Image (tube, rainbow, N blue to C red):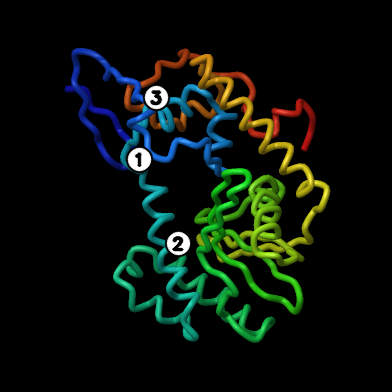
């Protein structure tokens, strides 16, 4: 057996050869309607081959520790945010695993209470589906501010500049305004590991670009599926790819080159 380290776990794989994947028939794939999400579009632009493994062949690996951590924290934040007393999060069974993140969330909720009069969001963990564009999204938090709303996404890291999340926030803003018939005033990120949170005014030119992005990426995905052409994109991001660690992809020994992101599709800066 070959032992591979995935996060903090050691996974054993057969030694004789790497796994073979049987492409699924279209009839075997439920809800096959080119439905898009932020993660789906980002994965296709990052690496079409990884997209094929995930969404065409449906090779679903065990979530890495960081993803499991994020799911647990999001669930706790959801239930705590709907309570008039966010301190209730201290009674949750997973609190002892993430005490710092939870205490940061309590402090954040108290600030929301002081500045907005309530710590309870207008919407929490809202699932929004745009039937016209077959787009699905989940928004962590929407807060009402007078006649407007502010949107907030939870991240489990310590801090990143907001500009690195502009595509996701603009994507959310466009479809929230379209589906909920509200006007988004500000967008922001809450970083649970540090307790920092940042809001800024919505950047309208970026929101206006979202429909064009969605159409272009959908056309690229349809073309790739029709031609069955999903090339590998080698970049520095390969080192974080779970498919590489499980032996489903064999990248070059010297992984280099630019990082391909979703904003490359226009060939110009965002």
Query: From this viewpoint, is residue 32 visible?
Result: yes
Q: Residue furthest right?
A: 205
Q: Position of residue 231 (x, y in %)?
A: 52, 16
Q: Position of residue 248 (x, y in %)?
A: 35, 21
Q: CA distance from mark 2 to mark 3?
A: 27 Å
Q: Residue furthest left?
A: 1
Image side of residue 245 versus residue 186, left or right: left
Q: CA distance from mark 2 to mark 1?
A: 20 Å
- The residue to which callout 1 is attached is 7
The quadrant of the picture occupied by the N terminus is: top left
Query: From this viewpoint, is residue 231 visible?
Result: no
Tell me: residue 19, above or below residue 86: above
The quadrant of the picture occupied by the C terminus is: top right
Tell me: residue 58, above or below residue 258: below
Q: Position of residue 107 (x, y in %)?
A: 55, 76
Tell me: residue 180, above or below residue 146: above
Residue 74, numbered circle: 2
Image side of residue 95 versus residue 38, left or right: left
The residue under the point 19% across, 13% down is: 16
Q: For the residues labelled 2 and 3, say whether their Cβ atoms are less than 8 Å apart.
A: no
Local SS, label 1: loop
Tell me: residue 45, above or below residue 62: above
Q: Please tell me in which quadrant of the rendered image residue 261 appears.
A: top right
Report the front residue among 236 and 88: 88
Select label 2 or label 3 by which is in front: 2
Residue 244, numbered circle: 3
Image side of residue 180 versus residue 11, left or right: right
Select label 2 or label 1 by which is in front: 2
The residue under the point 48% across, 29% down is: 51
Label 1, residues with CA under 10 Å away: few <14, some 14-19, many ≥20? few
Image side of residue 17 versus residue 222, left or right: left
Q: Position of residue 227 (x, y in %)?
A: 53, 14
């Amino acid at each position: 057996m070959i032992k591979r380290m995935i996060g903090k776990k050691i996974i054993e794989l057969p030694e004789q050869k790497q796994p073979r994947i049987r492409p699924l028939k279209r009839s075997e794939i439920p809800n096959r309607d080119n439905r898009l999400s932020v993660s789906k579009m980002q994965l296709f632009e990052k690496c079409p081959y990884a997209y094929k493994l995930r969404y065409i062949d449906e090779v679903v690996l065990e979530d890495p520790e960081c993803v499991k951590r994020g799911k647990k924290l999001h669930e706790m934040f959801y239930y705590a945010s709907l309570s008039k007393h966010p301190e209730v999060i201290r009674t949750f069974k997973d609190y002892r695993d993430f005490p710092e993140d939870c205490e940061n969330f309590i402090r954040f909720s108290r600030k929301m209470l002081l500045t907005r009069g309530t710590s309870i969001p207008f919407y929490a963990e809202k699932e929004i589906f745009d039937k016209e564009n077959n787009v699905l999204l989940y928004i962590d938090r929407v807060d009402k501010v007078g006649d407007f709303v502010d949107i907030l996404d939870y991240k489990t890291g310590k801090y990143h500049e907001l500009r690195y999340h502009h595509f996701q926030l603009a994507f959310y803003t466009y479809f929230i305004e379209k589906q909920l018939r509200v006007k988004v005033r500000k967008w922001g990120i809450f970083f649970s590991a540090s307790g920092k949170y940042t809001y800024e005014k919505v950047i309208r030119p970026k929101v206006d670009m979202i429909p064009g992005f969605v159409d272009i990426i959908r056309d690229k995905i349809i073309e790739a599926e029709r031609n069955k052409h999903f090339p590998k994109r080698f970049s520095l991001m390969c080192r974080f790819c779970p498919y590489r660690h499980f032996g489903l992809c064999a990248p070059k020994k010297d992984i280099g080159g630019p990082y391909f992101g979703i904003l490359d599709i226009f060939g110009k800066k965002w």
